[in-house]
Amino acid sequence: MTNSEAFYSCYCSNFTIFHHCRDKPSEARILAESFEKISYARLFKATEGFSAENLIGTGSFSSVYKGVFDENGFTVAIKVLNLLRRGGFKSFMAECEALRNIRHRNLVKVITACSSIDFQGNDFKALVYDFMPNGNLESWLHSVDRTLDLVQRISIIKDVACALDYLHCRCGNVIVHCDLKPSNILLDADMVAHVGDFGLAKILSLEEGSYANASRSSIIRGTIGYAPPEYGLGNEVSTSGDMYSYGILLLEMLTGKKPVDPMFEGGLGLHSYARSALADGCVLEIVDPVLLSEDVNENCLISLVKVGVQCSYESPQDRMDIGNVIHELFGITFASRS
């Protein structure tokens, strides 16, 4: 058995026990028996041959399909890794390692993994997740057909903060997500947010968690607009990198503008755009007009924009950590003005 095979076997057994430990005994047994050793053929059938009609998203190293198992009608999301692309296998292993021993209401839940061969004899690897019927945050923020009100956006902002608090402070090691952005935040039937896609995640020791000055990494992690500037300089990943991404995400949710919006040129960015509005006392002028149709509390919006700005400073040392963000968010009064 190779090292990767041994790791995968350990991952599957550890995850199955951990994932179902809070379920009723009978439910845990049925689910474990049903999914622990899922086959390629079963995933192929559930997705109707990985058909285009069942494709619900694509990423740098994978494609995600909706799957329905005929025997029980259970709906899942199946993330199929592109092993022909450089980094595909490493992405699979990174996600397995990051997710095998963690569980939180604001993280995607992995049901099981499949490591097999397809009908042509090619290596096949996939992760099977709980299906999120409301898709990803990206599809809500920048859609002409549907929108999120302020209460929903604040709830999602808090959900993502709670997920980062768990990853950075409360899961044993320190897990840095490295690719926090709207398309990686999934919404369930109740519009609860779940952070997903841990293909670029890195597990650090507790001592390494906030250290952002090392230059050992030659891999640029993250997505343009959301990745912190120090990653582009080759600095090692850290929790402060996630905080930068969170700050940009928060500002995007409040302004309705992507960090790569064409308006941001000549040194202007989402961070400086929001910081200038704070300094000039004109925050309402940059807020998404959809939010202004409500009887909103201006002080609430100002407080949220401040958090976004304080998380997304260029220097890692100047950014808020997740503990302070949680304190601020849950201390803000979100009531409408009278």
Image (spheres, rainbow, N blue to C red):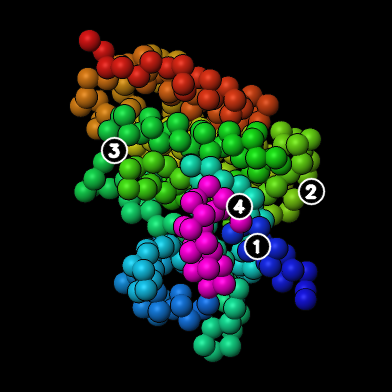
The residue positioned 35% from the left and 19% from the top of the image is: 334
Residue under label 4: 18
- Answer yes or no: do the residues labelled 2 and 4 have beta carbons within 8 Å? no
Mark 1 near mark 4, Cβ–Cβ under 8 Å?
no
Which element type, helix, strand or loop, lies under badge 4?
A: helix
For residue 113, the mark is none
Which sits earlier in the primary sequence, circle 3 or circle 4? 4
Which label lies toward us, 3 or 4? 4
Work out which quarter of the rendered image holds the N terminus and state it: bottom right
Asked whether 202 or 77 is in front, the reply is: 77
Q: Which contiguous range is marked in magenta? A: 17-38
Q: Which residue is mark 3?
A: 148
Indicate which label's residue lies in the foreground, 3 or 2.
3
Label 2 sits on residue: 216
Left or right relative to 80: residue 90:
right
What kind of residue is marked 2?
Arg
Please tell me which of labels 2 and 4 falls first in the chain.
4
In front: mark 3 or mark 1? Answer: 1
Mark 3 and mark 1 lie on one chain; the one further toward the N terminus is 1
Q: Amino acid at mark 4?
A: Phe
- Residue 13 tag number: 1
| Percent coordinates x, y for residue 140 in the rendering | 32, 46
Tell me if 99 is positioned left or right of 203 in this view: left
Vertical placement of 49 versus 293: above or below? below
Mark before the other along the chain sequence, 1 or 4: 1
- The CA distance from mark 1 to mark 2 is 33 Å
